[in-house]
Image: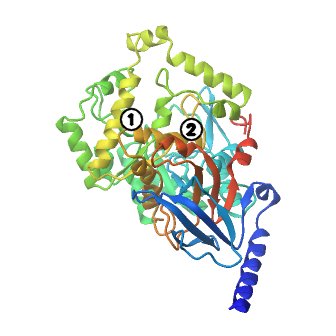
Amino acid sequence: MEKLSAAMMFFFTCIALCCAQTISSDVRQFVKAEAPVLALTHVRVIDGTGAAAREDQTVIISKGHIDSLGDATLAIPAGAQVMDLHGDSVIPGLVGMHDHLFYPMGNGIFGEMGFSFPRLYLAGGVTTIRTGGSLEPYTDLEIKKAIDSGQTPGPHMHVTGPYLEGKGSWALQMHQLTGPEDATRTVNFWLDQGVDNFKAYNFITADELSAAIHAAHQRGAKVTGHLCSIGFREAAALGIDDLEHGLLVDTEFFPWKKPGECPDTPKDMPFLANFDLQAKPARDMIVELVQHHVAITSTLPVFEVDVPGRPAIQERVLTALSPDARSAFLGNKVRVSDTSRLRRIYGTDTSPIAAAFKKEMEFEYAFAKAGGLLLAGEDPTGIGGVLAGYGDQREVELLVEAGFTPLGAIHIATANGAQYLGESDRIGTIASGKQADLVVVKGDPSGKIEDIENVEIVFKDGIGYDSAKLIESVRGVVGSR
């Protein structure tokens, strides 16, 4: 038995050395835990299924996967590196379903954060992302290649193609489709380049959206949408797979909306603030989405920053921002509370966004309780206060504020994303045989959800990365690169 054990350890060491050669020095500087066999002991396991946390557990990691897990009596393989995690919890790696690699630069222009955002996502415990719309798809694809080859740190990436936008877009960086044929060509071209998702945007026509969905589905890809010209029920009937942001972007209930047009009016937030979610139209919409198996991606953080007085601005956010980005964000926060601005836009000194934000929370809770697949994202756009990784953590906290239990919110941010991506057999929950994408946090987020911010180590493919070092490497950088 001793000879067999030694042989096995030699075998595992060879594998580790082979794998180590594929990780560049730029990545290795952030590695905190790496061994042929790792044993995480005395740790609280929150497995992502929604089940109660299990205390004093042992998790064995081998060859990038979870070999086994159990209580403190579980045998630890000879030669394993043991990490005593008393007081810590382990959760599945977060699956960020609206996690762009770009950031608002002002004047409607967005800059690619190809250096800082992959590091911050990983540091925040996000081990898999869907980019949720791309402005630089070639850049995103190259970043994915660099991460996969071990040349740069970051999460596993599902790259979404360039926005499928129609004529009349406000966004200079988006191609405007010229019709259904152009939509089909665009989808097929970018599938050939390596993207695996698409996102329809505000001004797309029904014919263009239908053509894009058909072309994507023909090749096993999915289409989500941040829509305006098309309402949620119409999109569901066309076969869309997912809808971003929820009620706050669904224009179908506006009395002033015209078919096929995106209404441009300041009346939307006051209307939604007073919208009756218990009325038949709203209930029917939720039922139709569930029946058509359309998911909803929650992006509560990007709306929260527009609410006067919310959220409490964290020092870690300001520290990560470049001086220009920090100044712009703080200036934007002042503007959202400016009474003269509110009076000019809404005719009142009180912002309707606070009430609309709560209505969005109520909608997401009702959708999930009706059987809908709710996904978690962050959307690092808006006025600039939502950052990669930090925003994903805040999303989970806001889901709890919306009415979900901490265990339920973690399930949404892990298992549900894996389900949508078709990767439930590999990620999303903690179980033997699954990929060792795990987050070690100090404290107990199953009881105090804010502890989800206390990330210490992030395991991706069984390699543990130092969250603090990743964060320090991008200090003062976000907003520049």
Q: Give the residue furthest to the right.
A: 25
Left or right side of 183 for 27 = right
266 in relation to 118, above or below: above
241 in relation to 19, above or below: above
Q: CA distance from mark 2 to mark 1?
A: 17 Å
Q: Secondary structure at mark 1?
A: helix
Numbered marks: total: 2
Residue position marked by numbered label 2 in the rendering: 380
Q: Quadrant of residue 189?
A: bottom right
Give residue 302's position: percent from left, percent from top. Answer: 50, 34
Task: Look at 71% across and 76% down and name the residue there.
Answer: 79
285 in relation to 372, above or below: above
Q: Secondary structure at mark 2?
A: loop
Give residue 142's position: percent from left, percent from top. Answer: 69, 56
Q: Counting other residues with Cα less than 10 Å from the Cα at mark 2, is it few (<14), some (14-19), or many (20 or more)?
A: many
Query: Identity of the amino acid at label 2?
Result: Pro
Task: Look at 76% across and 77% down and name the residue there.
Answer: 13
Query: Identity of the amino acid at label 1?
Result: Val
